[in-house]
C-alpha cells in the first residue's frame, strides 16, 4: 500500500519529467542565440522555471512543507537542483538506497552566477549592502565637478546619463568629472547611458481662453506636431500635439490615452483626418495644466515604431565609445535587441559584446516577450533588466504592476540576470527632503533587486544616505525571497 511519502515521490517524479520534456523545445530554440558559453546553463534554468510555473504547485508545496522539506518557493536560481534534492530526500524516506543529490556547489551555482554578473554590471557593491546604487545625473553635473565627487565618496556604484537631455559635449564633461572623482577617491563608478528610444511625448498645448486646467469631462484634440491650424474643433476645447503620428493613425474609437504618467486619462470618441478627439475620463479634482515634453501612453493601441530612432543612432556613436553600458528604452521584441546589437557591432566590431545592456521593461509587449528578449541579450553580452515602473504602470495598470514587479524579479533570478528597481524610489525625499512612510517600505522591498535607481532632485544626496542605510539594514534580513534569520535584537 503506497504511503503518503510514496505518493509525493511519484508526483515529484512526474513533475520533473514534465519539466524536462516541456523545457526541451525552448532550450533547443535558444541554443543558437547564445554566444557566451557561461549563459547556457542560465538559459536552461530559465526554461526549466517557465516550464515549472505552468503548474499549480500549491497542493504539493503544502505536503512538502508538512514533512519539513523545501516548499519550492525559493528555487528561482536553481530549479532542477532543488527538485532533485527534494526527490533524493523523499527517496531516502522511502528506503531507496544511494539517493543522488546535488552537491552544495551545484545547488548554489546559479546564485553564485547572479552575484558574478551583478558585479560585472555594476562593480563590487559597497561594504554593508548587497544592492548596488544607480544615480541619474542632472544637467548640472556637466558643469559641477563636485556632483561626481560626492557620489564617489558615498560609494555609488553606477551613474546614469539620460541621452534625452543635454548633448555629447555635456555628456563628455560629466564623464570627465567622473574620472577625476574616481582618481581622487579610488572608487570606480560605471557609466550607463540611456538612449531615449521612440518615446511618445506631448508637444505644444492649447487651452480655451480663461482656462488653465483641463478637467474630467472636457473634450481634447490630439494632433500631429504643427497641426493646430487644421483642427475643426471649437476654440473652447483643449488641444495638444503628439510627437509621433503613428498613434494618431492606429488608435481606435474607445481606446485610452494617458498623459504625464497617468495624471490624465482620455477615452477616444472620434477620429478625424487630422487626429483624435477624446474626452477626459479621469484626472485630479483640480485638473491638470497641459505642458509640452510630457509622456503619452496608448496602452490599447498596437504601435509599429522602430526600436531605434535617428537620434538614438546618432547618440550611439558617443555611447559606444564612452559608456560601460547602454540602457535600451522601450525594447519590446527580440528583433529590437537584434537591431541594437547590430548597431553596436557597426560601431565596435571587435569588442561590442563587452558593452553591458540594460533592458528597460516598459510595455505589455516587453513583458510578454521578456524570456526571449533576455536570452537574445544575455546570450551575447552582460545584461540587466530594469523594472521601469513609470511607463509600465500606465501601460498595464497599477494593480498589475504590483504583481509584475515581483514576476520580473523572479524571471531575472531564474535567468541569473541582475534586476534594477527603478522609478519614483524615495521620490518625495529626493524632491522635498522628507520621505513618506510608504516610499520607505517600497525602498526596503527594492533590496531584493540587485540594483536600485534614484532620480535627480534637490535632496538627492540625503536620499542616497538614507537608502544606503536602509539597504544595509535589509541585507541582514532578506536575500531575494529568502528571510535571513539573524538574531533579533528588539526583544530580549
Image (spheres, rainbow, N blue to C red):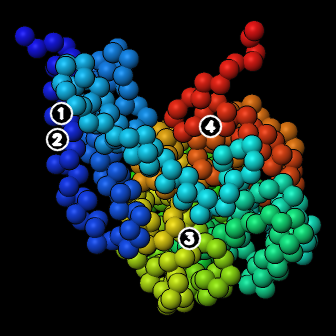
- Residue ID for mark 2: 17
> Where residue 13 is drawn, which disc sits there?
1
Q: Which residue is drawn at 59% across and 63% down?
A: 120
Q: Distance between the residues labelled 2 and 1?
A: 6 Å
Closer to the N terminus: mark 4 or mark 3?
Answer: 3
Q: Residue at x 28, y 67 (%)?
A: 31
Residue 356 or 169: which is nearer the viewer? 356
Q: How far apart are marks 2 and 3 (CA)?
A: 36 Å
Q: Residue at x 77, y 44 (%)?
A: 468
Residue 193 lies, in percent from the top left, at: 65, 72
Are there few (<14), some (14-19), or many (20+) residues within 10 Å of tag 3?
A: many
Instruction: Please name which of the two marks, 1 or 3, marks the residue nearer to the observer.
Output: 1
For the residue labelled by badge 1, is the local secondary structure a helix, a strand or a loop?
helix
Closer to the N terminus: mark 1 or mark 3?
Answer: 1
Q: How far apart are marks 1 and 3 (CA)?
A: 39 Å
Residue 247 lies, in percent from the top left, at: 46, 69
> Where residue 445 is drawn, which disc sits there?
4
Check whether the beta carbons of the residues at disc 2 and disc 1 lie within 8 A of each other: yes
Amino acid at each position: 500500500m503506497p504511503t503518503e511519502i510514496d505518493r509525493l515521490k511519484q508526483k515529484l517524479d512526474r513533475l520533473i519529467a514534465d519539466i524536462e520534456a516541456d523545457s526541451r523545445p525552448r532550450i533547443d530554440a535558444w541554443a543558437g542565440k547564445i554566444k557566451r558559453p557561461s549563459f547556457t546553463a542560465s538559459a536552461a534554468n530559465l526554461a526549466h522555471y517557465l516550464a515549472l510555473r505552468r503548474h499549480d504547485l500549491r497542493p504539493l508545496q503544502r505536503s512538502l512543507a508538512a514533512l519539513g522539506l523545501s516548499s519550492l518557493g525559493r528555487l528561482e536560481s536553481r530549479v532542477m537542483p532543488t527538485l532533485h534534492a527534494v526527490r533524493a530526500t523523499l527517496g531516502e524516506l522511502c528506503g531507496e538506497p544511494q539517493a543522488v543529490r546535488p552537491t552544495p556547489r551545484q545547488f548554489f551555482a546559479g546564485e553564485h552566477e547572479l552575484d558574478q554578473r551583478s558585479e560585472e554590471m555594476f562593480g563590487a557593491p559597497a561594504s554593508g549592502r548587497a544592492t548596488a546604487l544607480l544615480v541619474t545625473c542632472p544637467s548640472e553635473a556637466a558643469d559641477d565637478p563636485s556632483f561626481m565627487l560626492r557620489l564617489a565618496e558615498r560609494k555609488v556604484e553606477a551613474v546614469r546619463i539620460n541621452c534625452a537631455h543635454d548633448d555629447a559635449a555635456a555628456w563628455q564633461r560629466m564623464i570627465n568629472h567622473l574620472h577625476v572623482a574616481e582618481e581622487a577617491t579610488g572608487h570606480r563608478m560605471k557609466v550607463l547611458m540611456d538612449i531615449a528610444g521612440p518615446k511618445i511625448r506631448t508637444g505644444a498645448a492649447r487651452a480655451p481662453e480663461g482656462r488653465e486646467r483641463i478637467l474630467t469631462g472636457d473634450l481634447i484634440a490630439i494632433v500631429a506636431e504643427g497641426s493646430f491650424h487644421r483642427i475643426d474643433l471649437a476654440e473652447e476645447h483643449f488641444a495638444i500635439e503628439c510627437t509621433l503620428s503613428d498613434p494618431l493613425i492606429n488608435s481606435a474609437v474607445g481606446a485610452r490615452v494617458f498623459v504625464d504618467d497617468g495624471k490624465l486619462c482620455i477615452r477616444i470618441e472620434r477620429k478625424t483626418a487630422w487626429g483624435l478627439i477624446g474626452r477626459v475620463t479621469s484626472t485630479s479634482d483640480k485638473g491638470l495644466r497641459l505642458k509640452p515634453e510630457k509622456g503619452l501612453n496608448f496602452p490599447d493601441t498596437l504601435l509599429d515604431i522602430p526600436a531605434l530612432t535617428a537620434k538614438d543612432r546618432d547618440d550611439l556613436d558617443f555611447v559606444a565609445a564612452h559608456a560601460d553600458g547602454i540602457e535600451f528604452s522601450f525594447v519590446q521584441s527580440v528583433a529590437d535587441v537584434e537591431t541594437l546589437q547590430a548597431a553596436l557591432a557597426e560601431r565596435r566590431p571587435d569588442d561590442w559584446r563587452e558593452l553591458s545592456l540594460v533592458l528597460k521593461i516598459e510595455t505589455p509587449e516587453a513583458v510578454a516577450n521578456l524570456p526571449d528578449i533576455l536570452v537574445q541579450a544575455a546570450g551575447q553580452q552582460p545584461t540587466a533588466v530594469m523594472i521601469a515602473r513609470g511607463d509600465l504602470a500606465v501601460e498595464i495598470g497599477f494593480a498589475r504592476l504590483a504583481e509584475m514587479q515581483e514576476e520580473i524579479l523572479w524571471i531575472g533570478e531564474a535567468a541569473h540576470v541582475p534586476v534594477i528597481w527603478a522609478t519614483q524610489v524615495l521620490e518625495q525625499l529626493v524632491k522635498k527632503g522628507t520621505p513618506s512612510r510608504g516610499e520607505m517600505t517600497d525602498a526596503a522591498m527594492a533590496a531584493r533587486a540587485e540594483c536600485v535607481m534614484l532620480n535627480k532632485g534637490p535632496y538627492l544626496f540625503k536620499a542616497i544616505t538614507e537608502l544606503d542605510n536602509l539597504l544595509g539594514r535589509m541585507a541582514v534580513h532578506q536575500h531575494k525571497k529568502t528571510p535571513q534569520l539573524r538574531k533579533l535584537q528588539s526583544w530580549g
